[in-house]
Each structure stands twice: as structure tokens, then as C-alpha cells.
Amino acid sequence: MLSVADLKPCKGSKHKQPCGKKVRWTRTQAGLTFPVDPDQHPDGNTAVWRDVHGVLRSRTITAAQPLVPPEKRMMPHAATCTGAPRVETPPPRPPKASPPAGHLYDVLGVPRDATMRDIRSAYRRLARELHPDANPDPAAVDRFKEVTKAYDVLYDPDQRRTYDATGRPPRPR
């Protein structure tokens, strides 16, 4: 009934690393794979048998369903597995690169105490210079977007106040 061909290495579980021992992989009544130790065990609580299709099946032995003659009493491998517990640690997140304080002011080329008029005139000057219609350089497009973003944050008094306090532009709403 049980053969050496049924033995395959332990794959572990979501809670334990594989121990590498040979186990018998069976199918439960729910269709799940279930490992049992390779030899019969007098204290085991799992009945194992081969069905008519040659598949090793397993079930729990209970008072209502005792062991019947074609079944063998086996121990679930989880009870004897010596694999180390899995330590699931998520990969470390790269630190968020926060722009240095005053970065948006540097993009526009104005001091931190610049007035709204200074910010607007610096933006208009850079926009004329970097606009994609006026400047065919592909790097100018990225620089134009950066200048526009800096202007949007610094020209709005609420966003500018948040930026000055935190060093980061506020989140879009």
C-alpha cells in the first residue's frame, strides 16, 4: 500500500521553514495536500489509505470514524517537523528623499523671503525660457514641469506656509 515512491522532502509551511526530511504527501477530504511522517505511528491521529485512483488520502481519526482495516495510523508531519520558524520580514523600504529646505525657492531662483511679485516674475521669465514651444531641448520639458510645480506651491499662500513649515510641498487634494 505505501511505497518508497510516495516519499518526498518536506516543503515547510507558512509558519515553518522546510526541515528536509522525507514525508508522505497525502490529499485530505477537502483536496488539500497534507504531509504525514513516513512510518506508521501508534500515537498518530491521522488515517492514511490509497484510494481506487492510487492517490494517498488522509483524514483525522475520531470516535465517530475510527481506523478501518485498509487505513494506516500515521502522525502528521507538522507535529514532528524540526524546521525553524519562518520570520517574515518585509523588504526594507528605501527612505523617502525629502527635498532640502528651500529647494523650491532655488528652482525659481528667488530668496525665501521673496514677495509674490518676485515669485511670479521669476516664474514667467523661466517659463518663457523653458516652455516646450520655445525650447526644443528634451531636458527643458522636465525643468519646465519642475518650475511650474514650484510656482504652484509657492504662489499659493496656504501651500507656501505649509512648505515653509515642513520643507515639503503639501499633498494634492
Image: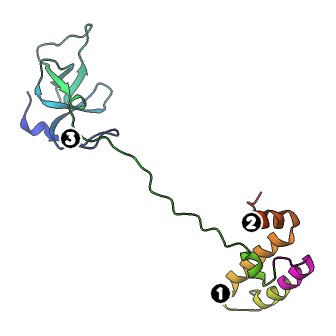
| Residue 73, picture quadrant | top left
**Dot label at residue 169:** 2
Q: Is 163 drawn above or below residue 56 in the view shown?
A: below
Rounded to the nearest angstrom, the CA distance separating label 3 from label 1 is 56 Å
Neighbour tally class for label 1: few under 14, some 14-19, many 20 plus, Cα within 10 Å = few
| Residue 97, picture quadrant | bottom right
Name the amino acid, label 3: Cys
Most extreme residue toward the top, as rendered?
64
**Dot label at residue 106:** none
Q: Are marks 1 and 2 in contact (CB under 8 Å)?
A: no
Q: Is residue 119 magenta?
A: yes
Of mark 2 and mark 3, the one earlier in the sequence is 3
Name the amino acid, label 2: Pro
Q: What residue is at 25 percent from the left and 21 percent from the top? A: 59
| Residue 91, picture quadrant | bottom left
Residue designated by label 1: 139
Q: Which percent across, then down, holds residue 24?
A: 16, 34
Residue 33 showing in the rendered view: yes
Q: Closer to the camera, 150 or 8?
A: 150
